[in-house]
Amino acid sequence: MEEKKKQELGEPNLRIGDLARRTGLTPELLRTWEARHGFPRPQRLESGHRRYTEADVAMIRGVLHRRDAGTRLEVAISEVTGAARIPLHSVYAELRRAFPRLEPHRLRKSTLLALTWAIEDECCARAQRATIFGAFQEEGYYRKARSRWNELARVGHATLAMADFTTVQTVDERPVRVQLAADSPMRREWVVVCDAPDLPAVLAAWELPGQQSVPDGERLFESLWTIDPRAVRHAARVCAHVAQTAGVPEASALIDELADEPEPLSSDPADAASLFGRVVAYVDQMASSRS
């Protein structure tokens, strides 16, 4: 049990024979790849032994998938290892770094709620086999959204919620809870990710400091959102790695699934219009409730 836990946390416990069995390759071929392409790259223990991690398994599977789809081996390795080098601590910071054209806006929490509900509604109504992540900062905020996220977990392929959880999760409970460490940057972030081929969407926001005396609904966040499938997949990968770091068993399989590049976005303008229409309706509802 302890060995399995270490593997889930990304510790180097796999011998080259283990790596070969997990990926369907031979140890000889793996050594050839390492010599020619510098991949996979083992970690050397204090004893001098070379070991691999669950992340190496996921990356090799990603390379094989690309190669089988017709990508040259060296290109496939470059794509997968490039994706694996992203910092894995903050969705907002990663989107700003990787997609600098995404323009941030300062929004009140009430406006973020409208955007969030619109994405959640569309995800429930139209997304097929969506992988869904949410970051709630505090467990209390998650509990207020619990009924919505129970429904997302019912219709989604995988649903994970991140917050400063202190209560124990039951074995079969969904969404899967991700307990964020006290020093995790995600404790300041508001995130909803819907990674689905027919409805990609991400909203990521970072709470501005020094708002202890500000009413909850008036708190300001630096925010960005997009339906660009590449940005959505990037955000989903960061969330999956955050979950893996937190020791969530399901995270390793999600990292493997998210290694592929997403399909291009549908050109049907009705898809974006539907989401935008929900946003407008919720913003209007919020404004009416304050008047």
Image (tube, grey):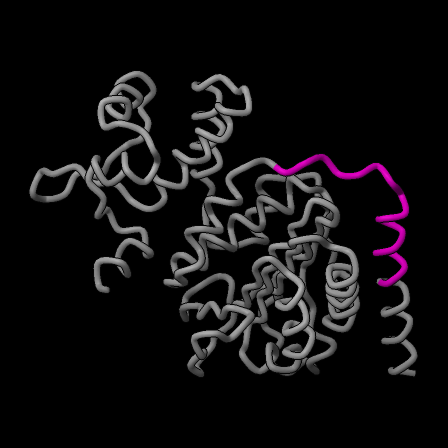
| Rendered location of residue 256, percent (x, y) | 46, 44
Q: Which quadrant, please, contains the N terminus? A: bottom left
Against 71, residue 160 (above or below) is below
The magenta stretch is 262-278
Comparing 287 with 69, the one in front is 69
Q: Which residue lies furthest to the left in this view?
A: 47
Against 51, residue 129 (above or below) is below
Name the residue rendered at 75%, 60% in the picture: 119
Quadrant of res 114: bottom right
Name the residue rendered at 51%, 75% in the picture: 173
Against 278, residue 97 (above or below) is above
- In the picture, measured across the screen, residue 64 lies left or right of residue 10, that is right
The count of marks equals: 0
Name the residue rendered at 28%, 38% in the picture: 21
Quadrant of res 155: bottom right
| Rendered location of residue 240, percent (x, y) | 49, 54
- In the picture, measured across the screen, residue 179 lies left or right of residue 29, that is right
Q: Is residue 268 magenta?
A: yes
Q: Does the magenta stretch include residue 17?
A: no
Comparing 241 with 8, the one in front is 8
Q: Which quadrant, please, contains the C terminus? A: bottom right
| Rendered location of residue 3, percent (x, y) | 22, 58
| Rendered location of residue 289, percent (x, y) | 88, 82
Name the residue rendered at 51%, 27% in the picture: 66
Comparing 159 with 115, the one in front is 159
- In the picture, measured across the screen, residue 195 lies left or right of residue 185, that is right
Comparing 238 with 104, the one in front is 238
- In the picture, measured across the screen, residue 197 lies left or right of residue 19, that is right
